[in-house]
Amino acid sequence: MIKPPVPACTTINFRQVRYLTIWKKGSSLLALMVSIALGSFLLLLIVAFFTQAANQNRELLLRLQLQRELHKVLHLMSKDIARSGF
């Protein structure tokens, strides 16, 4: 037959219960503060990473646009030089 579960702690006095509940409340508050601090730090890192990535992407697009315009200008200049007979 299956035996009923034995209680984990059969004799606990009032002081132990009071100490445990106070410690648990403080621990949860401390854990909450630490988790908020870590979450804020991680959020700051993520925002900084995406900001840097967006800036690099913008610079890359500007360079690509400049390179395309230079290619068009050189192509037009080569056509004009060929038409002039040189």
Image: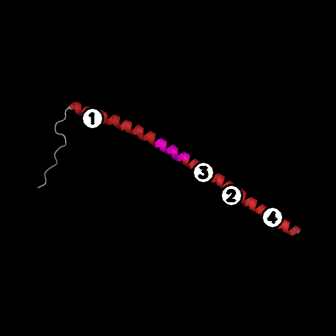
Q: Which residue is mark 1?
A: 20
Viewer-side label of 3, 4: 4
Viewer-side label of 2, 3: 2
Q: Which residues are magenta?
A: 39-48
Distance, label 1 to label 3, CA atoms, is: 50 Å
Mark drawn on residue 64:
2
Residue beneath the point at 65% across and 54% down: 60
Mark drawn on residue 76:
4
- 4 horizontally vs 32: left or right: left
Distance, label 3 to label 4, CA atoms, is: 33 Å
Q: Residue 68: image x %, image y %? A: 72, 60
Which badge, 2 or 3, is on the more N-terminal residue? 3
Q: Quadrant of residue 65?
A: bottom right
* 13 in relation to 43, above or below: above
Amino acid at the residue labelled 3: Ala
Q: Residues within 10 Å of mark 1 (few under 14, many from 20)?
A: few
Distance, label 4 to label 1, CA atoms, is: 83 Å
Q: Dot 1 lies on which element? A: helix
Viewer-side label of 2, 1: 2
Amino acid at the residue labelled 2: Leu
* Magenta stretch: includes residue 11: no
Secondary structure mostly seen in magenta is helix
Q: Mark 2 touching mark 4, by CB under 8 A?
A: no
Which badge, 2 or 1, is on the more N-terminal residue? 1
Amino acid at the residue labelled 1: Leu
Which badge, 2 or 4, is on the more N-terminal residue? 2
Which badge, 3 or 4, is on the more N-terminal residue? 3
Distance, label 2 to label 3, CA atoms, is: 15 Å
Q: Indicate the quadrant containing the N terminus: top left, top right, bottom left or bottom right.
A: bottom left
Mark drawn on residue 54:
3
